[in-house]
Image (spheres, rainbow, N blue to C red):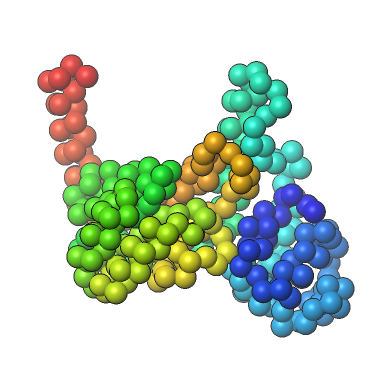
C-alpha cells in the first residue's frame, strides 16, 4: 500500500464496500491508476464505472479525472515525507525533525482536501453571524480557544463550550442568526455531535472541522471543512492533526477580518494597545 495517498486512506472508513474495493486497488497500484481510464480501472478493480465515479466524488473530486490528478500530485512528492509517530532515535535532533516534518506534511496534505468553496461559505457565515458558538473536547477545545481568542480581538461575540453540559446550554440558546462550529478530528466525538444536533434544532447554521471523509459531525454540517493527518491510533495525544486544524482557523480568521478590513484592523490595533498597557502596568 502506498503510504503517500493519504487522502484516500482517510476516506476509507466512509466508503461503501464496492467503493472500498476500488480504493484498495488504487492504493496497491497508484502509478498504474493514473494512466487508466475509468472503464479500465472498473474492470481491473472488479467494480462498476458508477462506483469509481461515486468514490471520486466522496473524495471531493468532480470526477475520476480530477482524482487521477490528485493521485499524480501525491506520487510526485518526495518519498521521505512520511509520518512517524514516535522516532526510533531518541536524540533531540530526531524529535525536532520528526515533529516538524509531521506538522509540515499535515498542512500540505490538508491542502488536498480543504475545499475553497466551503472555506468561502464558512467565512461568509462567520462574518454575518450574530454569535459564533465553538464546540470541541480535549485537543479540539484548544483549537476552539484559538478561534474564540481571535474573534474576540475583532469584537465578535463568540462562546466556547469545553464540556458536554456547557456546549448543550450554549447550543439551546442559539438562533437562526447564529453559527455553531464543531471541531473534532475523528468526527465522532459524542458531546460535539449532541451539541451540534441541538444547535441545528435551534436554527443555527453549522460548520464542521473534521478529518476528510464522511462522519457524524460533518453529517450535521451545512459547511464541511476537512483536514488530514496520518497520525496513528496509538499515541500520546493529537499533534500534527491539531496543527492542521489551527492552520484552518488562521485561514478562517483572515477571511473574516478581510470581510470588513478597516473596522477589524482598528479593533486589532485597539486590543493590541490595551494588552501592551496591561503588560506595562503589571510588569509582565
Rendering quarter of residue 268: top left
Quarter containing the C terminus = top left
Is 152 drawn above or below residue 186 in the view shown? above
Image location (x, y in percent) of residue 163: 32, 50
Q: Which residue is drawn at 28% across and 43% down?
A: 149
Kindly tell me whether residue 10 is visible in this rendering.
yes
Q: Quadrant of the N terminus?
A: bottom right
Whether residue 226 sits left or right of residue 84 in the image: it is left
Disc tally is 0
Q: Is residue 53 left or right of residue 196?
A: right
Report whether residue 105 is seen: no
Give the residue drawn at x 19%, y 31%.
Answer: 275
Identified at 61% across, 42% down, the residue is 234
Q: Residue 19's x, y, as percent?
A: 71, 73
**Camera-side residue of 209 and 274:** 209
Q: Where is residue 205 in the image (x, y as percent from the top left)?
A: 32, 70
The answer to which of 205 and 151 lies nearer the viewer is 205
Judge from the rendering whether residue 82 lies leftward or rightward of residue 218; answer left or right: right
The residue sitting at 52% across, 55% down in the picture is: 186
Q: Considering only vertical position in the picture, is 43 above or below 119?
A: below
Query: Where's residue 218, x and y in %?
Result: 46, 66
Amino acid at each position: 500500500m502506498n503510504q503517500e495517498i493519504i487522502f484516500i486512506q482517510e476516506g476509507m472508513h466512509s466508503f461503501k464496500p464496492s467503493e472500498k474495493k476500488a480504493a484498495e486497488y488504487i492504493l496497491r497500484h497508484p502509478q498504474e491508476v493514473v494512466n487508466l481510464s475509468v472503464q479500465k480501472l472498473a474492470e481491473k478493480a472488479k467494480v462498476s464505472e458508477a462506483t469509481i465515479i461515486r468514490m471520486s466524488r466522496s473524495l471531493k473530486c468532480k470526477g475520476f479525472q480530477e482524482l487521477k490528478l490528485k493521485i499524480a500530485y501525491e506520487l510526485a512528492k518526495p518519498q521521505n515525507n512520511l509520518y512517524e509517530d514516535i522516532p526510533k532515535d531518541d536524540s533531540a535532533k530526531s524529535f525536532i525533525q520528526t515533529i516538524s516534518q509531521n506538522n509540515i506534511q499535515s498542512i500540505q496534505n490538508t491542502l488536498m482536501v480543504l475545499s475553497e468553496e466551503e472555506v468561502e461559505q464558512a467565512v461568509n457565515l462567520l462574518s454575518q453571524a450574530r454569535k459564533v458558538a465553538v464546540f470541541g473536547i480535549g485537543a479540539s477545545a484548544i483549537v476552539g480557544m484559538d478561534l474564540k481568542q481571535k474573534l474576540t480581538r475583532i469584537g465578535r461575540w463568540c462562546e466556547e463550550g469545553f464540556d458536554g453540559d456547557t456546549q448543550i446550554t450554549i447550543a439551546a440558546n442559539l438562533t437562526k442568526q447564529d453559527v455553531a462550529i464543531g471541531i473534532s478530528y475523528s468526527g465522532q466525538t459524542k458531546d460535539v455531535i449532541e451539541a451540534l444536533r441541538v444547535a441545528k434544532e435551534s436554527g443555527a447554521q453549522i460548520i464542521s472541522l473534521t478529518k476528510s471523509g464522511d462522519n457524524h459531525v460533518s453529517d450535521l454540517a451545512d459547511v464541511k471543512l476537512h483536514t488530514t493527518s496520518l497520525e496513528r491510533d496509538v499515541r500520546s495525544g493529537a499533534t500534527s492533526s491539531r496543527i492542521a486544524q489551527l492552520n484552518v482557523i488562521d485561514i478562517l480568521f483572515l477571511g473574516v477580518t478581510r470581510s470588513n478590513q478597516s473596522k477589524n484592523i482598528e479593533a486589532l490595533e485597539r486590543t493590541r494597545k490595551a494588552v501592551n498597557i496591561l503588560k506595562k502596568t503589571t510588569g509582565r
